[in-house]
Amino acid sequence: MTVRRSELSEPRNSAARQDLVLLEAALYVAGRPLNLKTLASVIKTRSKNKTRKLAKELVEEYRNRDSALEILELEDDRFVLQLKGEYTPRVRKLALRPLLSVGPLRTLSYIAYRQPIPQSHVIDVRGHHAYPHLKQLEDLGLITREKTGRTKVIRTTEFFADYFSLSHDLRAMKQQLKGIFESFMKFEPSETSEKEE
Amino acid sequence: MTVRRSELSEPRNSAARQDLVLLEAALYVAGRPLNLKTLASVIKTRSKNKTRKLAKELVEEYRNRDSALEILELEDDRFVLQLKGEYTPRVRKLALRPLLSVGPLRTLSYIAYRQPIPQSHVIDVRGHHAYPHLKQLEDLGLITREKTGRTKVIRTTEFFADYFSLSHDLRAMKQQLKGIFESFMKFEPSETSEKEE
Amino acid sequence: MTAQVEKPFYFNPPWNILFELNRLRNIKPWDINISYLLNSFLQEMEKSGQIDFRASGMAVDSSSTIYLMKSKLLLKLEEAPTTPPKVKPEFLPPPLSLPFRYELTSTTLHHLLQVLDEVLKGERVFTVKPRVVPVLPPPSEILPPADVYMMEIEDHMGKLHRLLRRLTRESTPILFSKVVADLEKLEAIKTFIVLLFLAQKGDVALWQKPELDEIYITLAGGPAFDRPAVGIV
């Protein structure tokens, strides 16, 4: 659904406009994907349809703004407000909580693509410096390490899928990742050689 | 300076528009007031005038949107992106993560109340486990530790004052804290036994 | 008259190879039967009745050199082929770009002040405690002679110990606040210092819960605490 721009910036002074703004407030404060139930509770309605319609309207509104922020609709009727990926490198140093640097992100990419994967295999491929990466990724709740016999098997978590707006279904997620990696390699070959921290 | 609404949602495809969006990204990521120097570094300019002009334009743009968020110009040429006050009560419950766990929060509260205070004094009262607290508080930009002679003197930062909406003037801030603390203790003396982490 | 010195048998073939190692360069080690050479060398020496340990030593040394040459050749033959193994390079995906989401933190001024009261209570206890490790002060000319000082401390320690023994019959552990309940502030501080001396001597054990201002005292030999002492030992 597309909203005409003239409508967007004009205060509508209606209950619907007020609800839209409340949803924006909720998504800003939460900093994580919110499902329809939570969003509905914020605007004090039981109607998921009404909430979905408003949330989609907000997605569209953000899409039409030339902004650093975006609202995305994820699987299972969830919505999230976040910084557009292309701006992260320029402003990451301003985040109070340190963001993951390239090294751990590479390790995470590899795990996501090859999971479930024995820890020993990850270390073979990524080297011994990947041990602190695994600790960091586990602390952030992005991976789990499950002990099976003498080794540990690593998987990404549901939080990981949410964080990167990926499917919870493993097969589908890997397909999505493949697409992301391919487009990434096609358009930004130089960024893959970014120095690991 | 007022920007016409039709301009706002229309991508300008210009370097200035790109800088404007970068400033928005910076303010969103920081979640705290940023001064002109920091903002200028994000858009890679040395011109404070140019940065101020762009930031004011962004303030205006947000003012013209019917949004839950606002960008404000504070004292001393600082700018902040934040949730409009009237929406906070409705969405506050969605903020799940505390800024600090109880231990570091206690150390911070003590510093705020007694500042400027020698580090040795803080350690005497809070114990040796407060060393990592001080490191964390410093990393988060909530305190500064200034070496004077053989000890370090600790103060809270402007970010601390901004985060808790307190005065930047030390004497005024302590008065505020004392006043709120005393009235608060009168009404809620029992809620102080939370376990330290 | 000149005596003709006879050349020892081992300077003749085949044993001479053991005494002329420079010739080895031109001979293949595989052509030398070390076992035969050494055995026949010993037999010949026994037969002649001239036991020469120096010659034997040289023979053993040479044999080991020849043996080493053979071993090196063997090892060379066993070396793995030099062509590198073909390992299929694994696909290493590029780093995922992490979306940033600002998250409002839940800590408010209310929370900050909620915990302040606890800290200020702790401050009172620690400002009463002198900022010294409980060790005996060094003797000084200004202070009375050490033995008199010590005698007074001993005296106070004895009194406090008796008091604690009496209190322990009523309840264990003893609360420090109870010990100093009726004392003036200065007296309470003195009692605290004497208590530290008792603790240092091992007559009492002290512990304190984190963030609580109460100090718990047990007499040595009394019921022990399984919790470690905190703040004061």
Image (spheres, coloured by chain):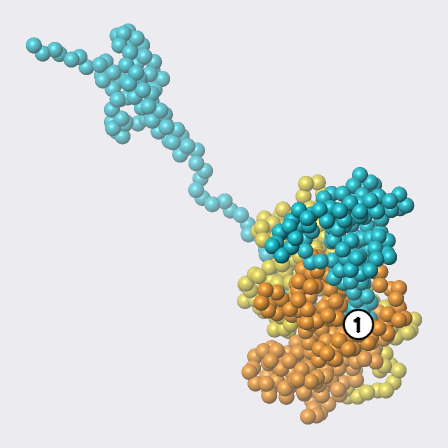
Chain colours: A yellow, B orange, C cyan
Across and down, in percent, residue B145 comes to 63, 68
Across and down, in percent, residue B180 comes to 82, 75
Depth order, front residue of A46/B32: B32
Amino acid type indicated by mark 1: Leu
Across and down, in percent, residue C106 comes to 79, 68
Host chain of mark 1:
C
Q: Would residue C120 be found to the left or right of residue B23 on screen?
A: right
Depth order, front residue of B61/C103: C103
Is residue C87 placed above or below B116 in the rendered structure?
A: above
Q: In this figure, which residue is indicated by the disc labeled 1?
A: C109
Name the residue located 61 percent from the left edge and 65 percent from the top edge: B151
Q: Quadrant of the N terminus of chain C?
A: top left
Name the residue located 86 percent from the left edge and 72 percent from the top edge: B184
Is residue B83 placed above or below B131 in the rendered structure?
A: below
Depth order, front residue of B75/C72: B75
Name the residue located 84 percent from the left edge and 43 percent from the top edge: C165
Q: Would residue C30 be found to the left or right of residue C123 on screen?
A: left
